[in-house]
Image: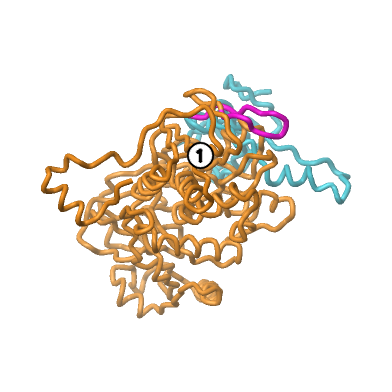
Chain colours: A orange, B cyan
Amino acid sequence: MRRYSAFRLIREAFRGHRAWERAWRDPEPKRRYQVVIVGGGGHGLATAYYLAKLHGVSDVAVLEKGWLGGGNTGRNTTIIRSNYLLDGNSRFYEKSLKLWEGLSQELNFNVMFSQRGVLNLAHSDSQRESFTRRGNVMRLNGIDAELMTREQIRREMPYLNFSESARFPIRGGLMQRRGGTARHDAVAWGYARAADGLGIDIIQNCEVTGFRREGNRVTAVETTRGPIECDKVGLAVAGNTGRLAAMAGLRLPIESHVLQAFVSEGLKPMVDHVVTYGAGHFYVSQSDKGGLVFGGDLDMYNSYAQRGNLPMVEHVMVAGVAMIPAISRLRVVRSWGGIMDMSMDGSPIISKSPIDNLYLNCGWCYGGFKATPGSGWVFAHTIAQERPHALNEAFALNRFETGRLLDERGAGPFPERH
Amino acid sequence: MIRIPCPYCGLRDHDEFAYVGDAGRTRPAIGLAANDRGPWHDYVYLRDNPRGPHLEYWQHVHGCRAIVKVLRDTVSHEVLAAGLPGDALKPDGSGEG
């Protein structure tokens, strides 16, 4: 892998940009690999990268049915934060955030990580108190958190609804300054290029159609490009976990739901942070091109369709206008849906499975993008060492049997409510 | 908009309904031994989560308030059949057992 640098950019500019090599190879699948990762999104590619980089396992194939980052990696609102309350979540997401902070250098690829701050708005005394508790827990865990008053928020975000007649007046908020956004495609491309540079085969247009089993082991993965033998299989296919699990004969504590996201026409710089509404489900940031990127709730019924429905579009717009009245005349230019692996407690599963050499990385609910580096980091460890890292012990599949749930929201086994 | 044929009210928009969830699960029998948690774990947490026809309950909260059983495709969102909770729905659209 030839490194990108400012010097090289200038040199190639003088040579007419004809000497750039392709960022990763397009290899034919080999007959056998030590590890096969199913899913060429951010999580799968990060897993492959850390397997080679940290665990010396480079005989790895990443299988992708479409193109890299064409699933949920390209369908999210790119928010990154680690403002969690529960121990199992908080340390894991903080590890992920720390990896984000060095990611562009690590991968030699600009992922455009922008630590612009993530603010959760509170609209009542009780909400402010629960945010105070969460902020204190974060600080005790060594994570930055800052409680903001209504006046402080008004100075920094004057465009929010501060009118006296607001139905849900802003009472304060919890800010994580180190949170922010990143360029989602660049994350997939950066990991792909770095993994490829370490000798990993990235195989696109290769859909998994089944698993060949022998006893309690998977011996080969059946694909549209022929069977591929392997010692270990890792699934990182959030959104399609139900289908892949069914092929392997597993039933999982997961339902697939569709979540919509939206982009508005471009504006001059207005929203400098990521801001989330506390009286409804709405979150917004502004992209470098100027469009507001925002989203809200799930459509609330099981779905594998990557498109949503109109009642939820209206619901999201209502919440958005309640939070920022100035956007009521703004036009939406694009909307899309992504399929979420909604788990039964709202937390992910990164775990060994009932099949000896099959490993699961799923159940990301709304929150998979920010976890990309951390997820790959602990999943690589789990696969290489055949046991979870301390950071993902709490994400075991068997927590639903033992009762050690990680229910951040306290919503119970109703996946659409998380 | 998904249109659901409520057995009491007729064809209605899905935003009159609240989604209840998977109707394909079987509640464990009464009298299960206290330490036999397996069937309850399966019932409460595990799902088939099919890509294709899915049996589910919706409640007509802004109508008759009845629970309606619906067979719906999770890819096309097409409603294949609907009926009362006790009906065994078939994808021929009859809505009767």
Q: How many marks?
A: 1
Q: Report the quarter where the C terminus of chain A lies.
A: bottom right
Q: Is residue A136 above or below residue B74?
A: below
The answer to whether residue B51 is seen in the rendering is: yes
Q: Is residue A293 above or below residue A150?
A: above
**Segment colored magenta:** A207-221
Q: Is residue B25 above or below residue A84?
A: above
Query: What residue is drawn where x is 54% and y is 42%?
Result: B17
Is residue A110 or residue A416 the one in the foreground? A110
Task: Specify the quadrant of the image occupied by residue A198.
Answer: top left
Q: Residue A54, percent across and down?
A: 50, 53
The answer to if A182 sits in the magenta stretch is no
The answer to whether residue A72 is seen in the rendering is: no
Is residue B84 or residue A391 the one in the foreground? A391
Task: Specify the quadrant of the image occupied by residue A160.
Answer: bottom left
Query: What residue is drawn where x is 48% and y is 64%?
Result: A82
- Give left or right: position of A60 versus A175: right
Residue at the spot of label 1: A59
Q: Secondary structure of the magenta portion, mostly?
A: strand
The answer to if A217 sits in the magenta stretch is yes
Q: Residue A162, percent across and down?
A: 34, 72
